[in-house]
Amino acid sequence: MRSEGYSLLETMFIVAIVAILAVIGTLQFREYLQRYRTEAQTRLLFTELLKARTQAIYQHRRTRVKLYADRFAVYSSLQDSSTVTPVQTHSLNYRLTSKSDLAVGQDIDFDETGITYDWCSVCLEDSAGAGGVDSVVIAATRVSIGKKDKGNVCESDSITLK
């Protein structure tokens, strides 16, 4: 006897395959989303540092970027008064780490020629290999973006520049 359609067993088999593919897709999407967010935050920090350096050169005025573990703020000058408000403040999803204590803040000052004497490396905490970039290296005349690949230490020697 010939009947049209699928049997219950065939339908259950198809539903099981679709469920397995959905679970795999969800896990892959979570990893992709973490990589994307890590890269986006690192590129935001990198861009704002470059913009502060460019503004210092263009306006012939010293500028400051103050880094904290959970945020960073951009100032249009080096005024050290507590009443001065930043031009921009960005909160961060992933915490920043550096050799210095970011809980009290770390100043990155650019002079009128765009040079800084605050050499350091700033990395995303516990990025666990996510993303193509997770670190920013700040040198006297250059701000570079990179990836920690030689251990989980936030030092210039452990970061490969991109």
Image (cartoon, grey):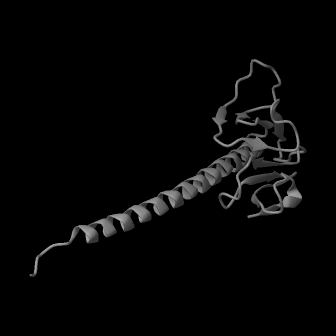
x, y (%) of residue 91? 64, 35
Label count reads 0
User: Of 112 and 122, which appears nearest the observer?
Assistant: 122
Would residue 149 appear left or right of 35 to someone viewing this image? right
Q: Residue shown at 83%/51% (left/top)? A: 154
On the rendered structure, is 102 left or right of 94? Answer: right
Residue 109 image offset from top left, x and y in percent: 83, 39
Say which of 18 and 123 sits in front.
Answer: 18
Q: Position of residue 56 (x, y in %)?
A: 77, 42
Looking at the picture, tell me which residue is in the foreground, 29 or 46: 29
Q: Note whether 30 is above or below 71 in the view shown.
A: below
User: Which residue of the protein is positioned furthest toward the bottom in this rendering?
Assistant: 1
The residue depicted at 75 percent of the width and 53 percent of the height is 135
* 133 lies above or below 103: below
Residue 75: quarter of image: top right
Q: Is residue 125 above or below residue 89?
A: below
Q: Position of residue 150 (x, y in %)?
A: 83, 62
**Name of the residue lying farthest toward the top:** 83
Quadrant (top left, top right, bottom left, bottom right) of the N terminus: bottom left
Q: Farthest residue toward the right?
A: 117
Look at 27% across and 72% down and name the residue there.
10
Residue furthest out toward the front: 1
Which part of the image, by quadrant, shows the C terminus? bottom right
User: What residue lies at 80% left-to-right and 32% top-to-bottom?
Assistant: 103
